[in-house]
Amino acid sequence: MKLKLLGLVVVATLVALATTSCSTCCCCKSGTSAMKATIEKAPFGKTPDGTAVDLYTLKNAHGVTVKVMTYGCIITEIDVPDRTGQMGDIVLGFDNFEQYLQLKNPFFGAVVGRYANRIAKGKFTLDGQQYTLVTNNYPNALHGGVKGFDKVVWDAEPVTVPNGVAIRFSYVSRDGEEGYPGNLNVGVVYTLTDDNELRMDYEAVTDKATVINLTNHSYFNLAGTGDILGTELRLSAGSYTPVDDTLIPTGEIASVKGTPMDFTTAKPIGRDLGQLTNNPQGYDHNFVLNRAGKGLALCAQVYEPTTGRTIEVSTTQPGVQLYSGNFLDGTLTGKGGMVYKQHDGFCLETQHFPDSPNQPTFPSVVLRPGQTYKHSTVFKFGAK
């Protein structure tokens, strides 16, 4: 059965598909700036089976730059100014495509799915049928399996937006891929606006009941180097989902009050981290966002004191996984020869809750034929 992907959330705001006779560059004008927001396309490498991988560079009217490749929709670079106007790259990653093929690549910058985060023991039951997934994070399934959405080449095309530039990625995940049921047509649009926002719009349809949970797994470091323990974070979350020793939720939704999980007022990420008992030590927990309605709502506010850089995150998702780079252990060499050590980056993975297919009290992650999965997340960059 051939599925037709419905219009993406962001498409409703598009003026038209970008058209150009040049295969390596297209531009669209910002109506509010004399500068042009631009998209450039360049070859970035080939997969082991010879599939070509392209790198798109999105730049807005203020010079903020986002680089993303067709392999895994991976964001390889985000350049934003600090309080003095000095541009700097704020995400972890590698210098070349071959490095991204490493088995130890910890999902740097990728779209992860079909199910982001963990599913207990790689099993779930849907409509009376049990499905068995690849357990790539023993004893659990993590981020879609051995070859999840982060390790496939997506189709890509520029789209024109009224206030910036955008790329639409699409992929068809076949029935049975990594154990998941249903042919799933997936679309992701990355939009870089002239308001210094990076917007991610996700959409999917299926021909068979399935489960889905998509997010982006960028590791941020707003100082550019060093650890992120002094970076200040506030989360719009009064509760979280406690986990067992394999990081699977117990089913409880607990208050953050009086615990190291309390980010309801801004604090350095490292202030209470030493109180955590997981191994390796650090945050790797799902926070339940304070929400009213289904639209975009404030999720997180981040401030890096030494550079002044900030991020404000809004999302339509019910949760966010705060991950403090616990498994970075000094064995990965990244951009410019930089060795990534524990807590050198943090992730804010907007999402549905881990193991939701096995937790009936959590928000549903089931997608059925005739329904459309839609979620959006916005990262707004600034400095103070």
Image (tube, helix red, strand yellow):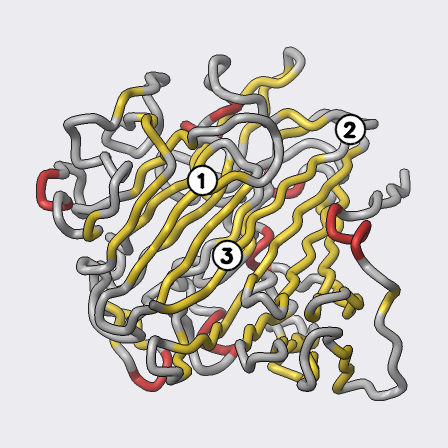
At x 30%, y 69%, the residue is 308
In the picture, measured across the screen, residue 319 lies left or right of residue 307, that is right
Q: Percent position (x, y) of residue 13?
A: 79, 54
What amino acid is labelled 1 in the image?
A: Asn
Residue 7 got which mark? none
At x 26%, y 75%, the residue is 225
Q: Are marks 3 and 1 in contact (CB under 8 Å)?
A: no
Q: Few, some or many C-alpha atoms within 10 Å of disc 1 (few <14, some 14-19, many ≥20)? A: many
Q: CA distance from mark 3 to mark 1?
A: 20 Å
Q: Percent position (x, y) of residue 194?
A: 62, 70
In the picture, measured across the screen, residue 260 lies left or right of residue 104, that is left
What residue does disc 1 label? 117
What residue does disc 3 label? 379
Mark 1 lies on a secondary structure that is loop
Q: Are marks 2 and 3 in contact (CB under 8 Å)?
A: no
Quarter of image, res 199: bottom right
Mark 3 lies on a secondary structure that is strand
Foreground residue among 172 and 76: 76
In the picture, measured across the screen, residue 351 lies left or right of residue 184, that is left
What amino acid is labelled 3 in the image?
A: Phe
Q: Percent position (x, y) of residue 220?
A: 37, 63
At x 57%, y 43%, the residue is 214
> Mark 2 or mark 3, which is nearer to you?
3
Residue 371 got which mark? 2
Foreground residue among 148 and 56: 56
Q: CA distance from mark 2 to mark 3?
A: 27 Å
Up-down relation of residue 19 to residue 354 (above or below): below
Q: CA distance from mark 1 to mark 2?
A: 23 Å
Q: Earlier in the sequence, mark 3 or mark 1?
A: 1
